[in-house]
Image (cartoon, rainbow, N blue to C red):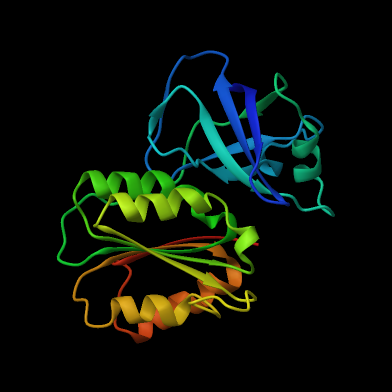
Amino acid sequence: MELTITKIIQETSKISRFFFKNQDSDTIQFEAGQFIMLKHPNWLDSADSRSYSLANENTFTNELEICVVLNEIGVFTPWLFSLKVGDTIQASEPVGSFIFREEEHAGPEVFICTGTGIAPFRSMITKALKLNREVHLVFGNRYINDVPYIEYWFELAQKNASFHYYPVFSREEFAQNKGYVHPVYESILQGQSDPRIYVCGWQEMCIEARERLKKMGFNRRQYFFEQYN
């Protein structure tokens, strides 16, 4: 499908939010957690497309949103960041199996992410809260100025008693949770019999999280991963 850029918001010094409308349809529906593939106009092979999770709150929308960090030495994101409102880009339909599982279970929904790994969790958390689930978000970044949607998460925690937000900072000197996400989610999950755990972010974090969750006794029916380099 062909998407037209309708809005660009610079979220942090290196992260921007891009909003698109479909040229051929007024509305788009996707599963909470899915992504789209974007194609550089100079790339002939579709396998060279780049995938970006949809960052919308709601899964039935007339405007798609992605959250992208600029890789200055890369090829795709410098080109993407050079685009303006009104420019077009080729994209796939929403795809992906990293989606929110609606089946009932005994424990809470625990979301663990770093950086722009937060993107798919916006729709997933919205869905979980609509189903009256208890939700925990453990969100790791280096500094507080790196955090996308920072006001959104604090406001959601104030408005909804079922939502619990744990910002974690590896380099922020006076952070309440200083370090990495692992000890924080391990504390939340201690003693939980049947949670659903969603992990998205840097590859190193996901690899370590998988090993730690296995050691805690959780299995592949209880945790789900999406990682990027």
Identity of the residue drawn at 58% across and 78% down: 174
Image coordinates of residue 189 in percent, x first then y, are: 30, 77
From this viewpoint, is residue 46 visible?
yes
Which quadrant is the C terminus positioned in?
bottom right
In the rendered structure, the answer to whether residue 132 lies left or right of residue 46 reads: left
Whether residue 216 is situated above or below residue 160 in the rendered picture: below
Which residue lies at the image location 57% right of the left edge and 52% below the top edge?
Answer: 148
Q: Position of residue 136 (x, y in %)?
A: 33, 64
Q: Position of residue 147 (x, y in %)?
A: 58, 57
Please give the count of numbered marks on the rendered protein.
0
Residue visible at 59% across and 30% down in the picture: 19
- The reply, left or right, for residue 227 in relation to residue 80 is left
Query: Which residue is most to the bottom?
Result: 215
Q: If the image is split into quadrants, where does the N terminus sit? A: top right
At which x and y percent is residue 142? 63, 69
Instruction: Classify 32 as above or below 14.
Output: above
Res 186 → quadrant:
bottom left
Question: Is residue 98 visible from the viewing direction of this image?
Answer: no
Frontmost residue, 148 versus 88: 148
In the displayed orientation, state which residue is furthest to the right. Answer: 73
